[in-house]
Image (spheres, grey):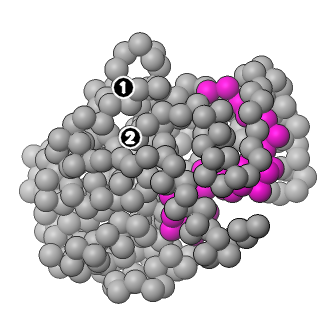
Amino acid sequence: MKIAVTGASGHIGNVVCRQLIEQGYDVNALYNKDLRSLESLNINLFQGSVFNTSDLERLLDGVDVVIHCAAIISIDGDPTGIVFKTNTEGPKNILDVSIQKGVKKIIHISSVHAVTETPHSIPYDESRPYKQLGASAYDYSKAQGEQILLNGAKDKAIEAMVLRPSCVIGPYDFKPSKMGRALLDFYLEKVPLIPEGGYDLVDIRDVAASIVNAIEYGKDGEIYLLSGKYYNLKELSQTIHNVTGKKTPNLTAPYWLIKGILPFVSLYTKMTKSAPSFTKESIEAIRNGHPNMNHTKAKAVLNHNPRPLEETLHDFFEWQIENKVISSS
């Protein structure tokens, strides 16, 4: 069976490719520019864009299943429109070319951010309502992308399903990801205090395993929540300390204080032309993180089985040391 993966050089994409190879699949991998995470893998490489249908036609030629990971994550709006364009036109183009090429199944990798987190008193599962216009740019784009795919695939000769990971962390984080960068800041003792709130964390390898299992077991038109376990940031900081021995903060800053610092962070990032370390969107996400995401459905159907946070953090930092991103001292 031949499987195509878009966004193959990203954190989720490259780990999915690794697990597909381990299970004996023939893999077509679409990447844009950065090849580092794919260089050692026995896969068929395709450089291109989800905006270019001829690139997708080459990628999907003779393919049975496509795993659509390509997306742009943003915690700082969408000033150029590329976030919304990528996260909505990408699924539409994948659907159109997949139907044209006779692909049997699309596995669309979305995000828990596509749906509402509050109120916390209501269970967080696959039935949560979609976020609407007025939500953060990334969240709204992921909500729209899901609906474009699922609605467009109805009554067509193709199966389509959506998988929603929570906050993904773990090894093989080459770039690194935004959360990977935050974990490295803890390790390097650059974090003086922590905001109130927390989020659901899940190991990249467990997410990738469930995605691969969806090839055989995922059902047409269904949505699966790939969550792990909720940790407030104080618990995360303590766990990083326990795993690494590094000095990590235990002082929690109230929401009003963190919000008050934001204008200075924005000014600093503009002056230095660097990515912001935190934004209003990221602080709101942590503040609103649902403490009880329920992945019962994914466990029953896809054998989704998240491992302990300690193991994930240990393997993340060990991988970063082995790849000389950080030192062990």
The magenta-colored residue range is: 169-197
Disc on the earlier residue, 1 or 2: 1
Q: Residues within 10 Å of mark 1 (few under 14, many from 20)?
A: many
- Which image quadrant: the N terminus? bottom left
Residue 83 - label: none
Horizontal and vertical percent position of residue 270: 85, 50
- Closest to the observer: 292 or 5? 292
State if disc 2 and disc 1 touch (CB < 8 Å): yes
Q: Find residue 116 and report its image quarter.
A: top left
Is residue 146 one of those drawn in magenta? no
- Visible in this render: residue 94? no
Separation of residues labelled 1 and 2 (CA atoms): 10 Å
Q: Find residue 274 and report its image quarter.
A: bottom right
Please name the residue that numbered disc 1 is placed on.
124
Query: Would you place residue 99 above or below residue 2 in this image?
Result: above
Q: Residue at x 48, y 54 (%)?
A: 311
Task: Tell me which amino acid carries mark 2.
Answer: Ser
- Closest to the observer: 222 or 132? 222
- Closest to the observer: 75 or 149? 75
Horizontal and vertical percent position of residue 148: 31, 44
Left/right of residue 53 with respect to residue 317 in the rendered view: left
Q: Residue at x 66, y 55 (%)?
A: 244
Q: Find numbered disc 2 in the image and state the secondary structure of the residue it sits on.
A: loop
Horizontal and vertical percent position of residue 288: 55, 25
Question: Farthest residue in the top direction?
Answer: 121
- Which image quadrant: the C terminus? bottom right
Query: Would you place residue 47 above or below residue 267 in this image?
Result: below
Q: Find residue 56 and report its image quarter.
A: bottom left
Q: Residue at x 81, y 23 (%)?
A: 257
Please name the residue that numbered disc 2 is placed on.
227
- Closest to the observer: 20 or 113? 20
Is residue 185 one of those drawn in magenta? yes
